[in-house]
Image: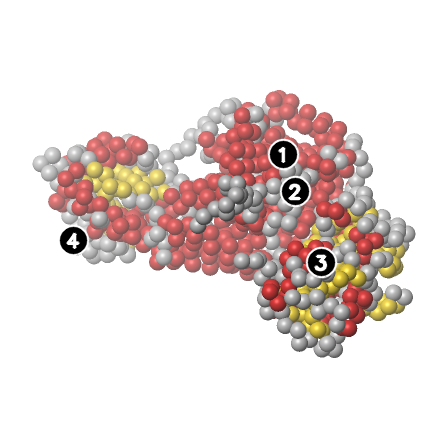
Amino acid sequence: MARRGRALLAPTVLAALALCGCGSISGSAGDFTPAHPGVLTVATSTVPTPGFWEGTPGRLTGGFEYELARRLAERFGLGSVRVKVVHFHRIVAGDLGGADLGMALITPTAEREAALDFSGPYFDAAPTIVVRSGTEVPDLASAEELRWGAVRSTTLVETIASRIAPDGATRIYDGQRQLLGALEAGKVDAVLFDLPLAVAIADHSGGRLDAVAQLPGPERIAVAMPKGSGNVEAVDSALRAFEADGTIHDLLEEWVGEEAADAEHSLPLLRTTRR
Amino acid sequence: MSAIPGSPPFASISVHSPSGAAWEFLILFAVVILGPPLMQRARAPGIIGLLLGGFAIGPHGLDLIGAGNTTVPELGQLGLLYLMFVAGVELDLGLVRVHRNSVVGFGAITFAVPMALGVGVGAVLGWDVPASLLLGSLMASHTLLLYPTARGAGLSADRGVATAVGATVLTDTASLIVLAAVSGSQLAGGSSGSIAGQIVIGLAVLLVFTIVVLPRLVRLSFRYLGTDRVVRYLLAVAAFLSAAALAESFGIEGIVGAFFAGLALNRLVPNEGPLMERIDFFGSAVFVPVFLVSVGMLLDPAVMVGGETLKLAGLFILASIGGKAIASGIGRLAFGYSGAQTELMLGLTVPQAAAALAATIVGFDIGLFDQSVVNAVLVLILASIVVGTLLVERSVRRVPAPDVGDKLGRRVLVTLEDAEQAPLLFDLARRVTAADNGIVRGLLACAPADAGERQALLDELRAAAFAADIDAEPHLLVHDSLPEGVVNAAAAERASLVLVGQRPAAASAFGTAGEAVATASPAPVAILLGDARSIKNVRLARSDPDDRIDSATESLAARLATRLGAEGPTQAHPPKPGELLIVPAPSWEFLADPPEPPSGAAVLVVPEP
């Protein structure tokens, strides 16, 4: 090769060698370091949550997010999954109770990102209205007249305020079970859940509850991790792999149901734009 | 309507901060417009301006286009398919054939060495096998980003350049096959045997579709639907999208299908033809820049300047550029290239862009690579482009321009006065250009007084050209002296051959138009006589030894005969209907009064070049 060519390649090689001296290297898809060796510890807010966390906190039997956590553990070479139940408002405030991950249908927001790190989304879900069977919500005007309820610290509180703007104040509950109890007892007329959960709740209610409409603008659902966690890349890569190989779709179909997986296309859309 | 009393003027006017699709596209196009020239002013390649511009507007920069935006990444994905299609369609397969031994040899070396080094780097880092193989394949590929520089310097026919171009077919195809295998193994369910089976079957179906079905389908579509230029362009786009979709249905990356579709349409879309101009135009104006901007949006300085990313980038640069340099050195020893040629080949094969990015993005999407790998590859791309640019710009000045030879079918100028002759003239032109992947230009010659009337015939000519599978873009040649006009046009078009359609009525007291063109044309001329619209048989007339035909004339007639698939040489008896007789002209007098063939037949007179 010509002398000039060699003269150009030499500094390139030197620069490359210099770069090689920087930092340490992790696996091609990121490395996962658990809080407790050999165990993936996951924080969630409500067990059971139909379709997402089945069983009891002491004896989990399945569910979409639980199985997703088990797949993550398998990928990271961890032998088991330990689940911690933590209030949702504590999770989104950054307190995962010492867990590696938080999985509770959490939507990343700017405020939450100040306290937590988030993976990329593992699915998108539209806010969906759940009512007692027989209650009709054909349009925004009828939605405004209903009494609404929501779980504290969820993004759905703001969604109700900004997009439904009900005539009365929204009642806030500490947990999902209290909220559903209030709905069944007639203390509130309507609540919002992320679409797959809304459909799963309606399915598990024995016909007492119904998912009647979705709002436009789906929200992203992601895995939360402690701020500054070194596991974000590994979790991100794993979720992309699960999205690409169909794991996420299969788990949704298995635990939340085909109907929920396709509800995005079948459930009526409630237009929330005011004329 | 009246204002509310007491309210300040314009109180009802509300101005929102810009958002939505129009705003995002405005931002995107602003980067496409401003990025490259700003970089070029800084004497850096324009492509870097697009990558940095993408970073500036992306979620890690000013966040003007946020992380949740799907429009730009999807448009970028289309741009990536487009880029791979263009890479396939632009390759000069004629040159690949000529230098096939060195192409295959150098292609194998310049694939194998960086591939081995890349896999080695993956192994040293403790990566699993699929990730290491993907890393090797992305380093083994290269993108002919700097080929236009070599072509602009008149070196496209240089042995080293042709070898590097041809090797690209092998390296990129092999890399894409590795990519298909790796991504297929990560995506498809089932055993490794069934995955391998699916990929093999998928590639076989894809090859049959792109080599057998697609060219025929596109040719038919061009003939029956493609009389409109917009439709021709859209057919080309639909062709690569169909191949990409077919590939994806077998779990193979769409870019593999797009690249194969480009190779399949290579002959149907001549490099200097109008359709290629359109494909290049939209590619360079919109699709490819948007792809590069969408890649730039992935740049995350927080990750890029991290120790891990820089270390990865250093290793990648060593393996990739080092591998390509070793391969070029071996190629020099094995095939006897000069030092300057070797440097030029290295400059051409060092730049990483389309295929490497495609493999990286696919690796990222399927969870094999994390963001630090993506950013390290982006650093590698920047470094490889800079190094490649410097190597090519230095070496093109030192590689002597090759003796191109006279490619008869490079640019054939068809000129006629009678539209009846168009179908046969265009058919002959297509056959002559086929071997050289050349282009055809059509001219309908007329005197100024006839211009208005003749304009209407252009559509008829265009249809005749499309029916012959060529896009000749016929133009009107208005000139007081038609032969002079044709000769000027031949010079302006840098024609390699002028095919003149001539009817007996064209003869005047000063001879025929064809004769006049032949005497002054800067390119060889062949004159078609007769009213045949199509031919079934071609014969080359045996010349009489007494005629003492010039050897150059004999040679030109023989070359035309070969390209037109002629029998012969045979006795020069008059052609039958459906027959074309190629006749080397024994003298200029012969041109003044050439033999008129019977109805339905044609004669191609070849005067002294």
First along the sequence among labels 4 and 1: 1
Q: Amino acid at mark 1?
A: Leu
**Mark 1 residue crowding within 10 angstroms, few (<14) / some (14–19) / many (20+):** some
Which of the two residues, B93 or B392, is positioned nearer the viewer here?
A: B392
Tell me the element at label 1.
Answer: helix
Specify whether disc 1 shares its chain with disc 3: no
Q: CA distance from mark 4 to mark 1?
A: 66 Å
Label 4 or label 3, whichever lies nearer to me, is 3
Q: CA distance from mark 3 to mark 2?
A: 25 Å
Kindly identify the residue that appears in the image at 67 percent across and 67 percent down.
A146
Residue indicated by mark 2: B59
Q: Chain of mark 3?
A: A
Which of the two residues, A209 or B51, is positioned nearer the viewer here?
A: A209
Mark carried by residue B382: 1
Residue indicated by mark 3: A156
Specify whether disc 4 shares its chain with disc 1: yes
